Amino acid sequence: AATMNAVITAAANQARQKPVKLSHNQEVARLYRKSLKTLSSWVIDRDIFLEEATNLRSRFDSERGCSNAKAVRLLKEGKAELFEFTHPDPYCVPFMPGGSLFMRNPPPPLEICFPDGDIPADAPKHTLNPDMSVCTPETGKVAVGSVLVDFGKKNME
């Protein structure tokens, strides 16, 4: 049993993607973007959101160009503050998992509409993802087979 666990662990480690090493500027940009998304979950009124977003931007800009040690400390504190203010039910786009329009009125499969297999020539040839977007390999959104819809994180994997 221990050998089997070691083999599975080794295979999982091989298949697992390595985390991307981000530059400090990329980490700060991601923190700012996540902060704005969290702010939009808490603030409904657009005028108040714009005012608070300006305050948030001024907080980020005031520390621009600081020493490396202070930048690392501020990034750590910023992530902790973002975690502290995370909304319990964050806003999501209505047609994505967790939204009010998710999978509303999905079209039935053509096999059910035409059980004899005589599908008309003008029938749509594309398939849809669970978020009702068209499956396209170019965008990486191809939900062929089973798709994991995580309602806790409100996304489609």
Image (spheres, rainbow, N blue to C red):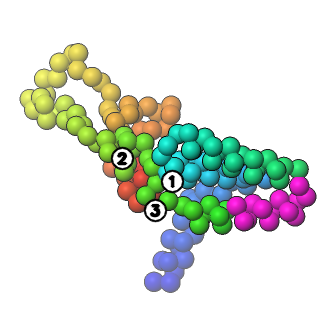
Q: Give the mark, 3 or 2, whose residue is nearer the N terminus.
A: 3
Q: Which mark is residue 88?
A: 3
Horizontal side of 40 relative to 149 (left or right) equals right
Q: What secondary structure is found at the residue carrying circle 3?
A: loop
* Range covered by the magenta-colored residues: 66-78
Q: Quadrant of residue 69?
A: bottom right
Residue occupying image coordinates x 51% and y 80%: 3
Q: Give the mark, 2 or 1, whose residue is nearer the N terminus.
A: 1
Residue on which the image places disc 1: 42
Residue occupying image coordinates x 38% and y 34%: 133
Rendered view: 151 above or below 3: above
Q: Give the mark, 3 or 1, whose residue is nearer the N terminus.
A: 1
From the viewer's side, name the closer residue of 104 and 9.
104
Numbered disc in front, either 3 or 2: 3
Q: Quadrant of residue 142?
A: top left
Residue on which the image places disc 2: 99
- For this orientation, the residue located farthest to the left is 116
Is 141 one of the magenta-colored residues?
no
- For this orientation, the residue located farthest to the top is 122
**What secondary structure is the stretch in magenta mostly built from?**
helix
How packed mark 3 is, by other alpha carbons closer than 10 Å (few <14, some 14-19, many 20 or more), is few
